[in-house]
Amino acid sequence: MSDEQVKVNTAPEAEAEQTAEDMNILKKIRIEKLDALKEKGQNPYEITKFDYDTKNAAVRTMYTELEEKLTAETNGDAEALKAALENEKIRVKIAGRIMTWRNMGKANFIDVRDNTDRMQVYVRMNDIGEEAFKEFKTWDIGDIVGVEGFIFRTRAGEITVHAEKLTLLSKSLLPLPEKWHGLKDQDMRYRQRYVDLICNPEVKDTFMKRSRILSEIRNFLDSRGYLEVDTPVLHTLEIGAAARPFKTHHNALDLDMYLRIETELYLKRLIVGGLDRVYEVGRIFRNEGMDTSHNPEFTSIEMYQAYTDYIGMMDLIEEMYKELTMKICGKGVISYQGTEIDMCSPWERLTMIEAVKKYAGVDYNDWADDEAARECAKAHNVEVEEGKTATKGHVLIAFFEAFVEENLIQHTIIYDYPVENSPLAKRKPSDPAFTERFEYFIYAREMGNAFSELNDPIDQRERFVKQVEAKRATGANAEVDEDFITALEYGMPPTGGLGFGLDRLVMLLTDSASIRDVLLFPTMKPLA
């Protein structure tokens, strides 16, 4: 019995159950085929290598170039060109997965896909032999094969490999999902990314572009004197930062440890040590909720540069995004979820006070004191998390979140944040209620965060203590990072620091709606 002989009942009321049953039947058939091969000493799993010499995309290029060359040599004479192509056959060895199959009796067409492209393969009994052809006819869609033959163009105009020898390299025991059934199940695509990559080639393009983006970021920073480093993923204490960590246990040391929620403090230790420009591409873990722009584990890129400030980091990130966009997308204006974003135009820069005044019509400077600020929030129906203890800074942040963020579609830098929510940023000498901090936004989404880094160990300790007290009030076992304070006491030069999420950047440059679309294996709740 072949796969085609298995009838699939797709009645909606029994679809899930019958699909599982049908899959088991098809798997059983394929295992029987595998057993038959083993009995004949043809176990495909015993094959250890296949020396292919050409990728499918290269097959097209090679044949097209040959046609152009011979067309010129024969002055476009059709008969002469045909004879010349016959005499100069290009023989290739390709390998890949069978994706489609068109049965025409003693001649078949299969599509074989590798990591570059699909390639039509013409398989005829007279060319590979009757016994080999009979064996070939027992293979299935999804099987991985090696093909040896020559390139030609069919009457329909498609570049094709004419098979002279076929080798079954691996047996697929599960059938690929039908186009109208399995491939569009978004949840299953995330859970079985391997099937998603097989069936949806455009997904592979996204992750190839992700790799290019990361490579270009490294090139950009390396060319400017930055040194890429690695810092610990496992930390021995829970710091006072707002993000919740994942907790684990080191058996040999009998010590509770925490997966890192940032790379910042270790990177700044390196600035203290005299490495003036450092960055890390780091996997970060935060024990928090999930949505279209948040995953519990994600990739951040943090960079620190001695002897500059947050203005210097503004210039750096603006330059980086322009260069990245041109190299990855080939143009300055991109489309994200139907909205055009001009990535190469100058970025708007607003203080938080200016942004709230522009979009909410409220001026921070009109608030005489904290009480006046709270009354203003109440009048505008703005909820302030801190309630009766809210300061002017807390209220400003609440107005920003309520009125401003949703309007920041084009790239915008918001700077000078209240000290209340910036525990690691340096205070502004001209106004100690604010810090030299900025965040930048694209498509109403925060994309990165930067500071003129706090290098005063006394001020830093005071802020850490407040953080820890607030964290412990929630039941956490937070501690001050005393070693980091010690590092600052040795002296850290004026430093600019910046961090951003790689995943959100990839979402932007690949027009992906969800962070799960740019993570090969996103976090998923187990199926019951």
Image (cartoon, grey):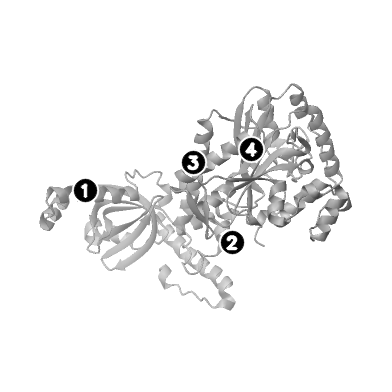
453 shown above or below 378: above
Give residue 323's mark.
3
- CA–CA distance in space, label 3 to label 4: 17 Å
Q: Residues within 10 Å of mark 1 (few under 14, many from 20)?
A: some
Callout 1–callout 3 Cβ contact below 8 Å: no
Residue 241 in the image: state x and y as whole percent.
76, 41
Identify residue type, mark 3: Glu
Q: Which mark is residue 146?
A: none
Precedes in sequence: disc 1 or disc 3: 1
Front: mark 4 or 2:
4
Q: Residue at x 41, y 70 (%)?
A: 4
Which residue is labeled 2 in the image? 187
**Chain-order first, disc 4 or disc 2:** 2
Q: CA distance from mark 2 to mark 3?
A: 34 Å
Q: CA distance from mark 2 to mark 1?
A: 45 Å
Q: Which mark is residue 498?
A: 4
- Answer above or below: position of 372 versus 179: above
Where disc 1 sits, the SS reads helix
Between discs 2 and 3, the one toward the N terminus: 2
- Quadrant location of residue 276? top right
Query: Dot 3: few (<14), some (14–19), or many (≥20) neighbours within 10 Å?
Result: some
Q: Nearer the viewer, mark 2 or mark 1?
A: 1
Mark 2 or mark 1, earlier in chain: 1
Relative side of 397 to 31, left or right: right
From mark 1 to mark 4, how far is it between C-alphas?
Answer: 51 Å
Q: Amino acid at mark 4?
A: Leu
Q: Secondary structure at mark 4?
A: strand
